[in-house]
Amino acid sequence: MIDLFGKRILKKMFVTSSIMVMILLIYLMPGVIELDNNDVATSVEYVDLANSVIYLLDDDNLLVESSISIIEDGNIINKIKSLINHLSEASSEIIPNGLNFVMPNNIKLLDVKVDGKNVSLNFNKDFLELDVKKLNRLVEAISFTLFNLEEVDGVSILIDGINISEINDSFPNVITKSFGINKRYDIEKTDDIVKYVVYYNKKIMDNSYYVPVTKYVNYSEDKIKIILSDLSSNYIYQPNLISVVSEELELIDYQLSNEEMILNFNNSIFLNGSEIKEEVTYPVISTIFSNYDVESVILKVNGAEILKKTSKNG
């Protein structure tokens, strides 16, 4: 039997042991907390994304504008490679219903070189296995996808290092916007041929898209009048293309300088009396940028400015 003195000794030993355990725990805990907070990776990597435009095929074999997001790292070659990849069936991207990739997955981009605002794209020989119609659409899609970049004015397409113009003389050595997209010929004679681009609206699977068409016609009047007459016409050669620009649209006057186009319309540019909508302004403005080398387009109604666009990409 333990006497009172022994009990006191045991109690002191218990208290001392408890204190030692508590000190040990306190000593160890900061290390555990430090490990949890500092040794576990908690950083999140952010990337800058930029909106761009590519061209995909619809079921009528027309190239349609489609908006995508690509990583913006300031490297033009990386940007070009990303855009070309988005045109290919080999891409992991999911495209909207009713649209199709324009480049078969057996076609590979081998190399990209940039010289000023000219870009050289070197593809493998499978590029030439396409029939004439598909080959033209592919060249148009690649070129005009890159023309939406401010850094690109000209595109050279090489096949295993040989310029496509040396293999097929229907293609120029350097492709520019003058090559055209979704080309349509409505000419009856070789005189007074006017070439221009018009943007139409198109609805595919309940989604709205824009389709640029390069047209060749016989006409001797001012090009801007031809273009606006085409946009506001109720007749379009392709039944599935539409223009929501009113037939009553009238160009009162316009001013063209080296850097700016000012268009002054009547009230018919509005929808529902006083509402201006993108499906009207986008085709008009994109058409102007595609036909005139200007930095900005200003739309007015009876002399009052309603919209200014500084660039097609802006």
Image (cartoon, rainbow, N blue to C red):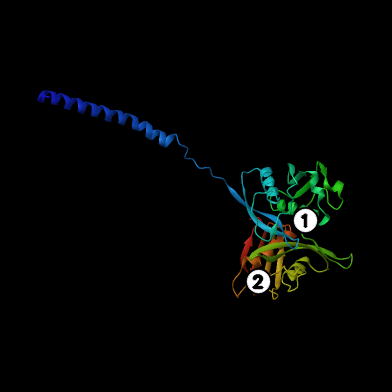
Label 1 sits on residue: 137
Residue at the extreme left: 4
Q: Is residue 272 left or right of residue 90?
A: left
Crowd band around label 2 with a 10 angstrom C-alpha radius: few (<14), some (14–19), many (20+): many
Question: In the rendered structure, which amino acid carries the disc numbered 2?
Answer: Ile
Of label 2 and label 1, which has the lower sequence position?
A: 1
Work out whether residue 279 can be spotted: yes
Front in this rendered view, residue 201 or 98: 98
> For this view, does 282 lie left or right of residue 9?
right
Q: Is residue 311 visible?
A: no
Q: Quadrant of residue 243?
A: bottom right
Q: Does residue 85 sit above or below 6 in this rendering?
A: below
The image position of residue 33, as x and y in percent, is: 37, 35
On screen, residue 183 versus residue 208, left or right, reads right
**Residue 168 placement (x, y as % from top left):** 86, 50
Within 10 Å of disc 1 (Cα), the crowding (few <14, some 14-19, many 20+) is many
Residue at mark 2:
269
Is the N terminus in the top left, top right, bottom left or bottom right quadrant? top left
Coordinates of residue 270 in the picture (x, y in percent): 63, 72
The amino acid sitting under disc 1 is Arg
The circle drawn on residue 195 is none
Examine the image and state in which quarter residue 224 appears.
Answer: bottom right
Identify which residue is drawn at 69% across, 45% down: 81
